[in-house]
Amino acid sequence: MNRRVVVTGASSGIGEATARRFAKHGWSVVAVARRADRLAVLAADTGVDTFVADITKQADVEALAAHLRALGPVHALVNNAGGAFGLASVEDSDAEDWMRMFEVNVVGTKRVTSALLPLLREGVVEGESASILMVTSIAAHVPYEGGSGYNAAKFAQHAMTAVLRLELAGEPIRVIEVAPGMVKTEEFALVRFGGDAAMADSVYDNVPDPLVADDIAETIVHSIELPPFVNIDLVTVKPVAQAAPHKMIRGELKVR
Ligand SMILES: NC(=O)c1ccc[n+]([C@@H]2O[C@H](COP(=O)([O-])OP(=O)(O)OC[C@H]3O[C@@H](n4cnc5c(N)ncnc54)[C@H](OP(=O)(O)O)[C@@H]3O)[C@@H](O)[C@H]2O)c1
């Protein structure tokens, strides 16, 4: 069977690695993001279908659904588009940054999920199940100083995921959450610090083996390729050097 997966935020980092890995596994992939130039490189490399959309814009999300309807059934949705803006305290952080984080991580994810659920239902054949996977974060589960709006948005995305699983109970649709810890992607920290490369690099300074995007892609693809009756509710994936968001070991790991 030709299985189709939609991956949002596929122009870089975890989403791009996930789109590439699904393509290697023989899935039909629809890669979604705002930057057409980066999606074009991905398409040229892998042959995946791409769609330019800003998930915070309802018209874009509706256009995506119309595009997918023309292609045929959808079997899996990976809600990965998201990110952090700033690392300031609750008191000092910019409310506009909070709005942007909620718009993309929470409301954008809700918009895409609502628009694609009818297509996911249509894609279910007997004995199979559809999959909706949310990429949240350990920040969706553990508060840390400076986490402020990102913690709040990711906690909200986690809550939405749990509610969705309850609401879809009784249908052959599984709802999976993958919560990564520190992943050294090209752009996550750069976006968080408004393009300040030195600040972004310092996040990963001296951290022995932070995760890379493909570690999360492997987890995502594995979770979705498990037998259709298996629902992995939550996978938390961290580097060994990270015991918690605020407990990161820098320097060599040594046996005591
Ligand atoms: N890296 C980490 O340490 C880490 C840890 C835990 C969780 N996460 C989560 O993992 C996900 C991916 O992170 P990443 O590290 O791969 O970050 P990234 O490299 O910055 O990728 C973010 C992706 O989301 C897309 N995107 C952002 N806003 C969008 C919008 N409004 N509409 C459509 N696409 C949008 C970006 O593409 P365009 O700019 O082209 O739209 C990009 O492809 C995020 O949800 C993030 O919160 C990351």
Image (cartoon, rainbow, N blue to C red):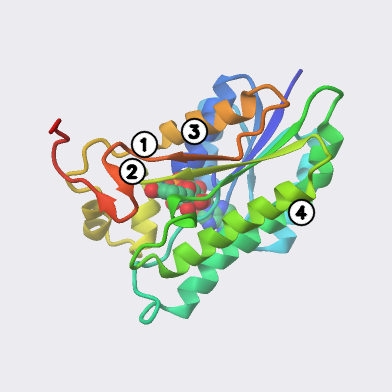
Type of amino acid under label 4 = Ser
Measure the C-alpha gap from mark 4 to mark 3. Answer: 24 Å
Residue at x-position 14% and y-position 41%: 251
Tell whether 12 sits left or right of 89: right
Q: Position of residue 139 (x, y in %)?
A: 44, 56
Marks 1 and 4, the one that precedes in the sequence: 4
Q: Which residue is mark 2?
A: 184
Q: Is mark 1 within 8 Å of ligand 1?
A: no
Tell whether 75 sits left or right of 225: right
Measure the C-alpha gap from mark 4 to mark 2. Answer: 31 Å
Question: Can residue 55 be seen at all in this image of the molecule?
Answer: no
Label at residue 114: 4
Marks 2 and 1, the one that precedes in the sequence: 2
Q: Nearer the viewer, residue 166 or 29?
A: 166
Q: Which residue is mark 1?
A: 212
Residue at x-position 77% and y-position 30%: 129
Q: Secondary structure at mark 4?
A: helix
Type of amino acid under label 1 = Val
Measure the C-alpha gap from mark 3 to mark 2. Answer: 13 Å
Type of amino acid under label 3 = Ala
In this rendering, the answer to whether 9 lies above or below 151 is above
Label at residue 79: none
Q: Secondary structure at mark 2?
A: loop
Q: Is mark 3 within 8 Å of ligand 1?
A: no
Type of amino acid under label 2 = Lys
In this rendering, the answer to whether 97 lies above or below 171 is below
Judge the density around disc 4: few (<14), some (14-19), many (≥20) Cα neighbours within 10 Å: some
Q: Which residue is mark 3?
A: 217
Which quadrant, please, contains the N terminus? top right
Q: Is mark 2 within 8 Å of ligand 1?
A: yes
In this rendering, the answer to whether 113 lies above or below 87 is above
